Amino acid sequence: MTATLTDRLLGRPLDRVDARRKVAGAAPYPSDFDLPGQVHAALVSSTVAAGRITRIDRSAAEGAPGVLAVLTHENAPPLAPPPPNDLGSTTRWTLQDDRIFHYGQHIGIVVAGTRAQAQEAARLVEVEYAAEDPVLDIGDPRAVVEANPYGLETGRGDVEIGLAAADATLDATYSIAAETNSPMGLFTTVADWQGGRLVVHDTTQYPTMVRASLAAMFEVPERDVRVLIPFLGGGFGAGLRLWSHTVLTTLAARVLDRPVKLVLTRPQMFSSTGHRATNRQRIRLGATGDGRLLAIDHDCLAANGVEDRLSSYIVASTPVQYACDNVATHDRIAHLNIPYTGFMRAPGGAELNFALESALDELADQIGVDPVELRLRNYAEVNPASGKPWSSKALRECLMVGADRFGWAGRDPAPGSMRDGDWLVGYGMAGVTFDFYADPCEVRLTVDRGGNATLRAAATDIGTGTYTIAAQLTAELLGLELDQVRVEIGDTDLPPAPQSGGSGLAGALGAAVKDAAGQLTERLARLDGGPGETFGAMLDRLGLDELSATGHSDLAGAAGSSELAVAGPFAARFAEVGVDEELGLVRLRRLVSVIDGGRLYNEKLARSQVIGGTVMGLGMALLEETVVDPNTGRVANGTFGDYLVPVNADVPDLDVVFVGGPDAFTPTGTKGLGEVGIVGVAAAIANAVHHATGRRIRDLPITLDTML
Amino acid sequence: MTGIEYVRAADPSSAVALVSEEPDAAFLAGGTTELDLALKDRVVHPSRFVDIGRLPLRGVTRTGDHLRIAALTTMEELAADATVGARLPLVREALLAGASTQLRNMATIGGNLLQRTRCRYFRDPAVAACNKRTPGSGCAAVEGVARMHAILGAGPSCIALHASDPCVPLVALDAVVVLRDADGIRRVPLTAFYLTPGDRPDRETVLRHGELVTHVELPLLPAGTRSGYLKVRDRSSYEFALTSAAAAVRVDDGTVAFARLGLGGVGTVPWRAYEAERVLVGAPANERTYRAAAEAAIRDPFTVPGTEFKVELAKRTIVRILRTVTT
C-alpha cells in the first residue's frame, strides 16, 4: 500500500469528530480547568494612557479578605527578557518598571482564595500617576513614525513614469477603524509550578511559542515547560502573541508556589489581547483608457503601540495582486498610546484588499469598464513580482463563476439605478489574491496492534476543525476508517507544530502527516505479509505492539527554492446591498463567494470557514470599530453590547462555491482557508454601496451616520 | 468583599417593607441590568437585594378600553398578548425591537421602565467624572465618545440616554405607572415619572425609596387609529436605538384628527413629542406636515460631536413612521 490522496475520505463534508463533545460541554476550554489547591487572580490596570506610576500602595489590597499576594513593579521578582519569535513579536513584560504606555496596561496582579476576593482586592490597590498627554491618533504630529519598519517596501519599474503615461489616474485615501478580535472564549491562564516544572493551560493559538517565551523569561529549560490547549474558544489571531496576563499569572504561581487561575473580563479583552490596527492607505493608480494598469503606488500608515512593533505589513503583497509593470509600496507605523496591536484574521491582506479593490472599482467607474472585466484585463498569469508560474491559480474561474452565480450581467452600471421599495439596491464585487504562511511542522504517527492510528503534534484546534481534518487525512493516507484514528494535539510535550494562524496549519500539518504516513506505509510495504493484511494483523504477526514514524514539513523553507511562485488562495466576492437613503441604513442582502483554496480536506468545514470569515468581513465593513476615548485613551466600547459584531439578523444568504484543484506546491495540494473568508468582503460591500447610491465611502466601518 | 444580602420577598407588602427599612436596599426583578451594575460594573452598591421575581405581579388584564399590565410581566409575554397585538401595534413592535429573545424572556416591564442608562462612562467606575454616579464630578461623555447618547433633555451635566424601546410608545400613549409603598398606592403618568438630569443627573425618577412599581395602566387606542414603531440602528438586532419613534395617528378625510408621538434614542428620558402632536392635529396628512412636526419635535437639541447626526436622523425617523402609519 502507498500513502495516496483520494476522495475516499478526503474532501468529504464529514461532521466534526469533536462535535458531540463540544455540544455536550465535554470539550475542555482553558477556563474549564481547575487544579487542586488553585487560587485566583485579578489584574490591576492603568487608568491613564501615558506617564509614570508615582505611588502604588498595596497595603489595603494585601489586608483584604482572602488575599495571598499583590504584585506590582515594586515587589515583583525580575524576569529575563522575552525572546523574539518568528512572528516578529516580542511582548513587553509589564511589571518591570513604573512606565505606562497605554490605558488598561497591567500594573499589578492580585491573588486571593476566590475570584471575587481577588477582583475586590484589585480595586483596593491605590495608584497615583504622573500622567502625560497621550498620543492616540494616527494623524497626531507628536506620534513617533517609523518608515519601512519591516523592510517590506518594494518597487518595480517606475510609478511616476507609469502615472505620467496613464490615460486615467486615481489618487484616493482609505481608512480602516481599529477592530478587536472578540472571540467568545475569554482568555484564560492556569499556571502550575510542579517543583521546577511549569504546566500552563493558556488560551493560545501558538503553544510552542508560549513555551519558548515562558522558558526564557523564567529561565528554565523548554522541556520543563508544558503548555496545554486542547480546545480554544476562538482567537482570530488574538492568540498569536504572548500576552502580559499569561506572564503575570505564571509569575504569581511561582511566587505562591501553587496553581493560579486568571480569566480576563470582556472589557479587559479589548486592551489585553491585541486588535487590528487602524490604518490609512493612499493608493495612486494609473491606467490606459481601456483599463490596463500602468502604475500602482500604495502607501500605508498604521498604528502600533509604544515600544511595540507588530502586524502592520499591509502593503506586503500589493506587488503580486495584478499584472502591472510599475509598482511601489511605502510602509509606515505610528507609535501610539493605545493597547498593543495584534493579529486579526488576514492581518494586512484584508486591509490591503479593501483599499486596492475599492480603488479598482473607482477606476472602473471612471473609465467605464465593467469591474469584473477590469480585473480580467489585469490578470496576473504569472507571479508579477517573481515572474515564476503560480503553483495554482483559479482566480479567473472565481471571477467568471461568481459573476454567473450572482447574476452580475443583470447589473445596470449606473449608480442609483436599482431600487426595491425604500431601498436602493447596489451590486459590488472584489477580487482576492491572498497568501499563507506555514512554519516547520513535526508530527508523530503511530499504528498499533489494534489496527488503530494515533497522530500527535503540538498543534491547536482554534475551532475550525484541526482534529477532524487531521483524522480525515490520516485515515485517508493509511487506508483506515475515520474512527480508527486518534488525534492528540494542544500539548507542547508533543512534536512541535506551528501556530494556527497565517492560514498555514492545515498545509503544514497535512504535509507532515503525509510524510509520516509515507514512511509508515513504505516500511509496512516491506514487511507486507500479503495483499489485504491489516496493520493490526501485520504487527501481530511481527510481534510488535506499535510502529511509529516522525513526519516533517517546512513549507516556508521550501517555498524559497521552489520553481513555482507559491500561491495562496484566490477568491471573488459579489455582494448585493440595500441602502435606505433616508435613514442611512446599509444592509447586506446576499453575498456570493467563489474560492480557490486548492484541495479541500473537508468541504463542510471549508464552507464553514468561509461563511465565518464572511460574517467577520461584514462586521469590518459595516459595524466594527474599537473606539478609544480621545482624552484618556480608554477603550470606550469594550463590551459586546457596545462593540458591534454581526448578529444572525445581519447575515443573509451566503453562497459559497469552491473552484480550482490541488495546488502543485504543497504536498497535500491545500492552500489554507483560515483567513481568505474575510478578504474582499469589505470592498465588495463598499463597492455595492457606491453602486446603490453613487457615494464612495472610503472609511470603514460604513455606519449610518456616514450615509446621511 | 462587602457582601450583599439577598432576600426573597413573600408578598408585595413585605417587599416594600424590606426595601424601605434599609437605605441601600434595592428591588431585584428580571435582573438583566441590576446584577451587572452591582456585581460586574460595581457602580451601584446595594446592601440588600429584595428579589420580587416570584411575587404574583404577572399578567395582563383588560377592563373596557384599558390594559392593566402587572410589573413582572415579561416583554415577550406582553408582546404575545392578543389585545396588544390587535389594538396597540406600536407597543408590540417596540417590545420586539428591544434586546434579544433571550433577554425579553427574562426582562420585566417594571424592570424595563427602571433600566439604567447604558452610557459606558456611567458603567465604568474607573471613569471619575460622572455626575449621575457622583453629582458634581463632571461628565466624561460630553467630552468623550458619544454616540449612544441623548440630545433632548440633555445638557453639559449629563447626556446619558434612556435606552428603552417599550417606554417610547408607553409615553406616547399616556401610560400610568402604579406605585405602592407603605403609605399606599399612587398613580403617576409615565410622562411625569422620569426626571431630566438638570443639575442632578443622579435623580432619574419620582420614585421614593422603597416604592414598588406594581402595574402599568395603558389606554387602548381609539378605533380607526393606526400605529407603529420604527427603530433605527446599524445592527439589525440587539442594539439600542440610535433613534426611534412610536406613532399613533388617525386621519379623517385627509386631515390628522388624532396624533401621538414618542421618541427613543434621543432623550435622557423616554420622550413625548407634544409639540409635534400639536403641529399634526388638524393639519393635512402629507409630507410637509410630517416634516414640520419633525422640526417641532427636535427643537433646541443639546449635541456633542458624536451625536450631531441624531438631529437630522431623528427628524427623518419621525417623517418615516408618520408616512408609514398614514399610507
Image: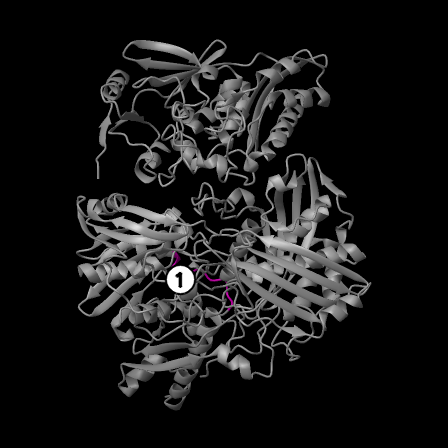
Q: Is A704 above or below relative to A172?
A: above
Q: Is residue B239 left or right of residue A207?
A: right
Please check the rendered image and state whether residue B1 is part of the magenta-colored stretch, yes or no: no
Picture quadrant of residue A584:
top right
Q: Which of B320/B88 is in front?
A: B320
Residue A371, position as x, y percentages in the image: 73, 58
Quadrant assignment for the C terminus of chain A: top right
The residue type indicated by label 1 comes to: Val
At x 34%, y 32%, the residue is B34
Say whether residue A608 is visible.
yes
Q: Is residue A690 left or right of residue B102?
A: right
Dot 1: what SS? loop
Q: Is A505 above or below relative to B322?
A: below
Say whether residue A594 is visible.
no
Which chain letter matches label 1?
A: A
Residue furthest bottom in the image: A526
Please check the rendered image and state whether residue A16 is part of the magenta-colored stretch, yes or no: yes
Residue A402, position as x, y percentages in the image: 67, 59
Q: Is residue A335 left or right of residue A187?
A: right
Q: Is A211 above or below relative to B187?
A: below
Q: Which of B253/B26 is in front?
A: B26
Q: Is residue B195 left or right of residue B279?
A: left
Graded by Cα atoms within 10 Å as few (under 14), some (14 to 19) or many (20 or more), the crowding at tag 1 reads some
Which residue is labeled 1 in the image?
A17
Q: Which of A24/A641 is in front?
A: A641
Magenta-tinted stretch:
A11-19
Residue A158, position as x, y percentages in the image: 72, 73
Q: Is B49 above or below relative to A568?
A: above
Quadrant assignment for the N terminus of chain A: bottom left
